[in-house]
Image (cartoon, coloured by chain):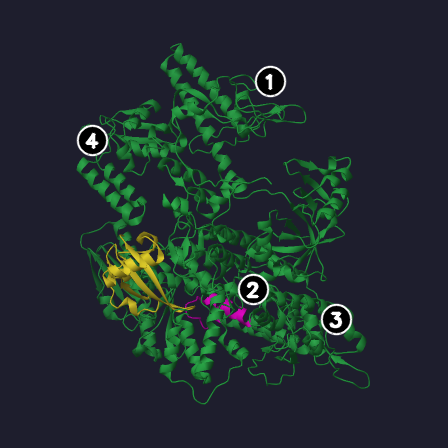
Amino acid sequence: MMLETYKRIAGIKFGLLSPHEIRKMSVVEIRTPDTYDEDGVPIPSGLMDGRLGTLEPRQRCATCGNTAAMCPGHFGHIELAVPIVHVGFVKYIYELLTITCRECGRLLIPSDKIEKLKEKMEELKKSLGEVPKRFFDSVKSEAKKRSECPYCGSPQYRIELMKPTTFYEHQREGGVIRLDAGTIRSRLERIPDDDLRLLGYDPSSARPEWAILQVLPVPPVYVRPSITLETGIRSEDDLTHKLVDIIRINERLKEAIASGAPTLIREELSDLLQYHVTTYIDNEAPGIPPSRHRSGRALKTLSQRLKGKEGRFRLNLTGKRVDFSARTVISPDPNLDINEVGVPIDIAKRLTVSEKVTVWNLEEMKKLVINGPDVYPGALYVTRPDGRKIRLDFVADRKKLAESLEPGYIVERHIRDGDIALFNRQPSLHRISIMAHRIKVLPYKTFRLHLAVCIPYNADFDGDEMNLHIPQSEEARSEARLLMQVQDQIISPRYGAPIIGSTRDFLTAAYLLTRKDTYLDKREFFTLLAAIDYDGEIPPPAIKEPEPLWTGKQVFSLLLPEDFNYFGRATVCKHKHTSPDEECPLEGVVVVRNGQLVKGVIDKNSIGAERAETLYHRIVRDYGTGFAATFLNKLCRLLNTFITMRGFSFSLDELNLPEKAKESIAQILREAEERVQKLIEEYNRGTLRRIPGRTLEESLELLIMNELSKARERCDEVASTSLTMSNQGIIMVRCGARGSELNIGHMTACLGQQSVRGRRVVCGYLDRALPHFKWGDQSPKARGFIESSFYKGLSPIEFFFHSMAGREGLVDTAVRTQQSGYMQRRLIHALEYLRVEYDGTVRTTDGEVVQLRYGEDGVDPSKSDHGKAVNLQRLLERMSLKGCETPPTPEELDELLEKYRLRLTPYYISELRRLIIDKRLSLEDARKLIEATVVEFENSQVDPGEAVGVVTAQSIGEPGTQMTLRVFHFAGVRERDVTLGLPRLIEIVDARKKPSTPIMTVKLDEEHRFDRDKALAVAQSLVHTAIRDIAAKGEYEIDLDNGVVRVKIDRVAMKNRGVTDEDLERLTLPNTTIEFTGDEIVVKPKSAMDLPGLKKLVDKTMKLHVKGVPGIKRVQVVEEGGEWIIQVDGSNFSKVIQVPGVDPTRTMTNNLYEIYETLGIEAARNAIIKEAKEVFEGIGGGLDLDIRHLMLVADIMTLTGRIRQVGRHGVTGEKSSPLARAAFEITVSNIVDAAVKGIMDELKGVTENIIAGQDMKVGTGMVDIYMTPSSSRER
Amino acid sequence: MGSSQKIRFDIFKHELVPKHSILSKDEVEDLLRRYHVKKYQLAKIMARDPAAVAIGAKPGDVLRIVRRSPTAGLAVFYRFVVEG
């Protein structure tokens, strides 16, 4: 056997190449601007010189003698006639020129200060592990202060940088001199190494003068291959074109210098050379026109090759192409196992697995080899023990080869049933987008999969395609089998409940099967038993006479374990039943006793996917994923057989409501219309009541919308009450299989208001939506209210409105996927380098501690029971512990619990105590319960190595696509406008200084909390009031005669805002005197002013703060939880908490920065968690998300003591690895920066190792031998 | 931040602010040994952070923070005080 050894790249060092090094590594100096001669032979010392490597398949490299496949390529070089500035480093050159002496090159800081700074630097390095950028910045600004060198005393001139590469020096005498690259170079040469270190530069790997090019390296031909078109014309790479330009000018310049040409010509040529070298490096450098191809297309030069989505980093380094993969259309197959994937035979014949020949499989392997590549169970290659690989396509006599097989050979055989494969559908938003399946080779051309796994993949069958990968090593196969199989992914890591379960028709079938009136005759019953391969005792029929009949519940019970007990509610019933003894006409109370479904129907709440605490969830938790997978398989097969047998369809007639219902819907709509008309009239008359904090127009609009949406809801209600469970559509809706009451309403009753941008349709023509209406028509119909249902059909106008709303929906989805995609990318890059260490801490790969225990209790959500490590109630039930006469005393109990304090969290200690006392458990039973709790708790702990960061990023990013983008204005009148959903989430992870809708919830102290009037008074004192707010409309006057400004005051507005005369008398404005006359404010400047001055004074007066807290726009007093609280639009936390009457300890704001500033980083962390949690809870019914994920994001955002953004200016931008930063955004700058600082990337993170093509130190990749062999220990 | 305006009330009374306390030298040693970390590998807190100011923490100190946790009930965390 070949012994495979491989080495890891320990690190990648960045730096600058010195001219010496460039010459040393060069194999040829390139001087000829041509590539090939007429015969197509490379011209010696031309750009395609054979010594640089060879492109022709059979030719050998002139340097190393290898063929194209083996030759690594060799650099050449160009000797530049004059020094040239490297564009990438201009920023650093400029910086150095301004802070070092132009004569002696020393840093412009006196030596005593330098010594102090050096000490400080050492100290910082010791205490912080590295020197922060802040320090270098301070050194630089210190040096910038001086205009004279403290060493040689020479005066320093101002340096100006003309983008991209020209430097000017402003002489003190007034002249401006252009600095040529040679001068700059010699200045940079003079800077001492020690001074550079103080600036963060690493002179050992990057002397600054090396940023001025004297020699240009020429990359090997493999970097810029020329391609031969079909027409036989050679086409050169963009880089080659650029190099040709450089050489051409360079040679001309050399000649010019040699022949002593005039300076002007030389300068012109140097400038041209500079231009070409600049565009060769970066063709998008600001300030110069990009170099173009003959066709006008801008050339793709070095920088452009690295940058962006299509650049080297993102396209080729972080995403790699693979072999052993397949892609085709998918289609469903309910007869498969959830763990299986159907693979078309044609694909099975192309994909292989390598199998070692042993004495046990020798005969079988021989057969496979004889079958060859084209007969199905065959093989594609045979590898002999000496390493020679034989392709079976080319073997004439396969029988002979088969005979020669013996143990030690390796056969690349076709994949076959039972082999493991990874199955994937893009976009891979979470880890369950890639799962391991067992292969089942099937006829036809599509991949087949079980319907239950559509949810994790988010797949349907309208033409979706999926990818299949065959793991090749034994190690990879084992990992796939043990960690990635579908059954092990049933519990979602996002919320700790099943994500794989029954859907759609399976739910309908389950409902129909387990309904009270479902009876099955002998034939039907046994058909179903056969479907689930039932092999046990036949239950006695529920009805024996006249013929034996079984209930559907009996059949369902056959799948349940015998000791299974459960109580839950079905979706069909909306009542909140709390006891298993309750009776429900709709069979909404689901009770399983000892494995028998005693009562209730099975529907989405019992076996559905994406639901927590269901019957199915209990089975997964209590009986393990293996059992759950079989349960689900059998269940689906059973339900599939049943519904095929029974039949199920939905017809158009079922959408026709009875006449009476139609009438009452028409009546509701008529009444709504009338009410709206009344509102409009009131508005026109001016008697409409204004909603506080809104204009009259807004109020009208809100009231109308409220009225109309109520009307539609009532229509829906009429429809849904007049349709019964005999309606197939209603069955599907009620049991959770498909559709909603809203959909039914739309189809049968009324479509309701169509909205564009969250309001009634207004756009279109001037003051009207369509030319069919009168100007300014506010009536429902003219603004997009649709009275028709889909059954009735839409009128052309209604249809048009519906299309408008429909289009908006489409646009919204498109925008949303983009936004959430980018957010996910940022989260992934910010969190990817986190993992759980062996000591249970969550750390970055650099060893920084982010959490002492994952999620503070170390529980892995995917091993938890909906976020909880142990379900105590359920545990108690299962252990069937009963109370006793003599419960332990509290002291005894505490003593017992004390023993487990270190093994459990404080939460469980107190929960257990409560439960034990509650249930009056004996000391012995208590001990048993605690022991069982400890076992379950420890089983639910995260595994060391778990990439918790990535899991978190996925768990937050994946539901992003499901969030509504737009701020949802509920028709409710009282709603506040708050940014919710995806935009708010993005705001939080962006760590914006100010949210787009700042809001405070102000709680009041004991005195003001219970009295509405007192609360109102506090509220009034909060509102920010300026003179503008109480000035009568337009009533101000510039009194030129007296040189004063007069502002009329509106008494009513004053009263509304609670402004007293005293408030106005107290007013002051610098350099003026203010007088309040009772109905007028007179502002008189201390010194006389002209008209423009007075006009400015008016502005100042209007803005003058009268009372309240700046930033507070609107307040509303609301009763909540038995006390009066103030809801505030606008936020100013630090000021509001100081207002008398406010309870500072419970007052909140959604402005994270204000919390950080006034309460500190820990409070900010808690606020981030709280705000993000509200986003997820606030969306239609709530998107389930484990709190641990939010904690991790908050912890990484607050790790450094300040709030960091998830993105390039925060978490990702501060990563230590330049490769990881370059792979995310701003690629080129990050690499240039790393070069100047001479950084060594130690390849610790995930991205870096993907770039290097090696396994990352996370998960199973983290496992290593932590042992020192005794031999080396002795040394 | 903090210093510019006087805060009238004890910020530790606010719902969002957990308890902070300064670790003794021995406790710091113990912590660093237990988790095999250098001080700077701990999470950080600014010296001018209102909570740090309130308990008089200086750069170089390590703070113990006892958080109320929705998952564990109570959870302990440490932050290293840095300049700024």
| Cα gap from disc 1 to disc 3, whole angstroms | 75 Å
Colour assigned to chain A in the rendering is green
Query: Which mark's residue is nearer the viewer, 4 or 3?
Result: 3
Identify the element where label 4 is drawn. loop
Q: Is residue A361 left or right of residue A892?
A: right
Residue bounds of the magenta highlight = A685-707
Q: Identify the disc placed on residue A491.
A: 2
Q: Which residue is mark 3?
A: A642
Residues at discs 1 and 3 both on one chain: yes
> For mark 1, does the 10 Å Cα neighbourhood hold few (<14), some (14 to 19), or many (20 or more) residues?
few
Mark 3 or 2, nearer chain start: 2
Mark 2 or 1, nearer chain start: 1
Mark 4 or 1, nearer chain start: 1
Q: Position of residue A1215 (x, y in %)?
A: 40, 47
Q: In this orientation, which residue lies closer to the viewer: A2 or A1027?
A: A2
Q: Chain of mark 3?
A: A
Mark 1 or 3, nearer chain start: 1
Residues at discs 4 and 3 both on one chain: yes
| Cα gap from disc 4 to disc 3, whole angstroms | 93 Å
What amino acid is labelled 3 in the image? Phe
What amino acid is labelled 4 in the image? Cys
